[in-house]
Image (spheres, rainbow, N blue to C red):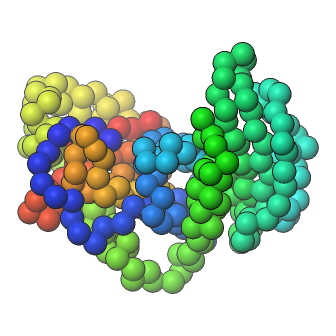
């Protein structure tokens, strides 16, 4: 997240969470309270398949999630055995292979003392879900793993909940997301209409202190020219972090949209936001991928 130091206590009542979906999936996958920051999102033009990469500063876990329609396997156990049987040259030599179930997920895990001669002491867990015609492949890993860390892996899997899009969600998470999304929509109206200077003025004071208006206007005009007019924009990923020391102790949000433009289809737009002291969300960064 592109923010720097700011003074002030984090908003009380906020809880770390991430949620993921695809345009066509009938659910959102939400993971609550695991201090995960969403760093990368990719989506396929079919609007049914996507990839999310997350990390945790607190636990040092890396978590990636692939979503795609069920085709190669039909159950969590079958998908687990399919992934294990397929193998991966990048795994190299591993030991202590184990298989089992955590809630609705079937998993396998193994330990890698080293990778290409470098000591890493890494545990890899692959947890497989099948939900409403979709296969969710979750990979959790940690370098410098110790046995006492294993509950961290189990907690991420147990914290993964599938929420139907057809049911109106009324949790505090949804209220937080709605507020951040409303601010994002207002800011994107400036960006989409090439009101580049105005979009810079509407950004966080931190961002404005680290960038010149001229450089932002050039950036804005460049990407608007390359992409053309926006024709579709749908939210597929979001994350809220209560703080990100030492950069800031304010709540932060990441929103990821799968978007179509006149000149390019299936672009992922990632926006970072910060909750200001006045209770308003402001955009800190915008990156189209």
Q: Name which residue lies at 88% across and 40% down.
A: 86
Q: Residue furthest top?
A: 117
Residue 242 falls in image quadrant: bottom left
Residue 140 % position (x, y): 64, 47
Q: Is residue 76 left or right of residue 196?
A: right
Residue 272 % position (x, y): 30, 47
Q: Name which residue lies at 57% across and 67% down.
A: 159
Does residue 116 lie above or below 238 as drawn? above
Report if residue 232 is visible in the image.
Answer: no
Q: Name which residue lies at 73% across and 71% down.
A: 104
Q: Is residue 32 left or right of residue 240?
A: right
Report if residue 108 is visible in the image.
Answer: yes
Residue 246 % position (x, y): 25, 40
- The one nearer the camera, 95 or 159, is 95
Does residue 46 lie above or below 174 as drawn? above
Q: Name which residue lies at 57% across and 77% down.
A: 164
- The one nearer the camera, 96 or 91, is 96
Q: Is residue 39 left or right of residue 187?
A: right
**Quadrant (top left/top right/bottom left/bottom right) for the N terminus:** top left
**Quadrant (top left/top right/bottom left/bottom right) for the C terminus:** top left
Q: Is residue 175 left or right of residue 135?
A: left
Q: How many marks?
A: 0
Residue 52 % position (x, y): 55, 47
Residue 276 falls in image quadrant: bottom left
């Amino acid at each position: 997240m592109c923010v720097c130091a700011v003074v002030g206590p984090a908003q009380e009542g906020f809880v770390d969470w991430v949620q993921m979906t695809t345009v066509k999936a009938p659910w959102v996958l939400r993971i609550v309270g695991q201090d995960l920051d969403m760093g990368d999102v990719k989506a396929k033009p079919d609007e049914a398949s996507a990839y999310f990469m997350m990390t945790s500063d607190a636990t040092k876990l890396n978590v990636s999630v692939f979503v795609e329609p069920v085709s190669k396997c039909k159950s969590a156990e079958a998908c687990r055995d399919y992934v294990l049987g397929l193998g991966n040259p990048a795994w190299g030599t591993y030991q202590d292979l184990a298989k089992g179930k955590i809630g609705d997920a079937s998993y396998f895990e193994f330990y890698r003392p080293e990778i290409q001669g470098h000591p890493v002491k890494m545990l890899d867990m692959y947890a497989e879900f099948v939900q409403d015609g979709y296969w969710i492949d979750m990979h959790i890993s940690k370098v410098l793993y110790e046995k006492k860390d294993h509950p961290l892996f189990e907690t991420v899997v147990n914290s993964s909940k599938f929420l139907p899009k057809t049911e109106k969600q009324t949790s505090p998470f949804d209220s937080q997301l709605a507020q951040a999304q409303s601010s994002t929509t207002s800011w994107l109206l400036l960006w989409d209409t090439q009101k580049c200077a105005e979009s810079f003025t509407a950004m966080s004071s931190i961002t404005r202190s680290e960038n010149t208006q001229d450089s932002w206007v050039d950036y804005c005009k460049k990407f608007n020219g390359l992409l053309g007019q926006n024709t579709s924009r749908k939210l597929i990923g979001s994350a809220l972090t209560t703080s990100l020391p030492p950069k800031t102790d304010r709540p932060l949000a990441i929103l990821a949209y799968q978007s179509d433009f006149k000149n390019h289809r299936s672009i992922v737009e990632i926006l970072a936001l910060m909750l200001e002291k006045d209770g308003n969300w402001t955009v800190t960064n915008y990156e189209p991928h």
